[in-house]
Image (cartoon, grey):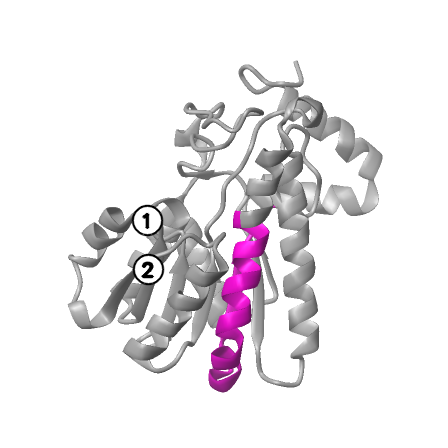
Amino acid sequence: MFKDKVIIVTGASSGIGRALAEACLEQGARVVLAARNKEAMEALATGFSPEKSLVVPTDVSSEGDCRKLVERTIERFGRIDVLISNAGISMRALFDQADTKVIERLMAVNFWGTVYCSRYALPYLLDSRGSLVGVSSIAGYKGLPARTGYSASKFAMHGLLEALRIENLNRGLHVLIACPGFTASNIRKTALAGDGTAQGESPRDEDKMMSAGEVARHILGAIAKRKNTLILTRQGKLTVWLNKFLPSLTDKLIYKHMAGEPDSPLS
């Protein structure tokens, strides 16, 4: 399915993004790895044929970086078949205790990063009748307490991608919104506290979560089947389902669950 396809993966230096890039390379795709950590991406790319990969240091919150990412992809490979907007950061702080700069940062990376990459890649995706993929979260379906900026950015991402799907309904563009649920990755360790510093330690048992590699396999399967949405984990599916029919109960269950985290801002 992915052999010789040109696939851009943002946030490719760690977590789900790294797993996606590695899985695509293993399947024979030509992969453009984009993230700020050049060394980590180069370490991954060295295990594969140099003709199959391109490392482009990219800060997705910079429109110029995103434009250059697409330009370098076209210069090297001449087309784009899949764009996976995966780069993202989280937060953990009550809204009234968070600096507004923290929320601005989350919107810049999670939402505007998706906007910029999608805008410049779109003409080439339309030419290839390709796939535009946003790696989102259950937080894009249900607001999570102490993750206000994160939820806001993911709700915005959902609205953007759904509108793009409908705008291009008759132009062959495939749009996938993928929501992994809690995944073993470094996103909680790098989550921002209320003052903008990194949280440092995950409040959850990472060993009990779905692995990044398993998430990557599910996402690639959904791209191959040209699905519109992908919701992973029983907890994620249950949250979305309950919120449709019992939203007030879901509010209480989510509050209780999030308040039970170690050192939760809610407790």
- 59 within the magenta span: no
- 110 within the magenta span: yes
Number of residues whose C-alpha sits closer than 10 Å to that of mark 2, classed few (under 14), some (14–19) or many (20 or more):
many
The residue indicated by pointer 2 is 33
Residue name at image x 25 percent, y 66 percent: 53
Q: Amino acid at mark 1?
A: Ser
Q: Which residues are magenta?
A: 109-137
Quarter assignment of residue 28: bottom left
Horizontal and vertical percent position of residue 120 = 50, 71
The residue indicated by pointer 1 is 13
Mark 1 vs 2: CB contact within 8 A: yes
Q: Is 21 placed above or below 79 here?
A: above
Residue name at image x 62 percent, y 38 percent: 103
Horizontal and vertical percent position of residue 231 = 58, 52
How far is disc 1 from disc 2 in space, using C-alphas?
A: 8 Å
Asked which secondary structure carries label 2, the reply is strand
Marks counted in the figure total: 2
Horizontal and vertical percent position of residue 7 = 38, 69
Nearer the observer, 117 or 128: 117
Q: Is residue 238 visible?
A: no
Q: Amino acid at mark 2?
A: Leu
The chief SS type of the magenta part is: helix
> Quick one: quadrant of the C terminus?
top right
Quarter assignment of residue 67: bottom left
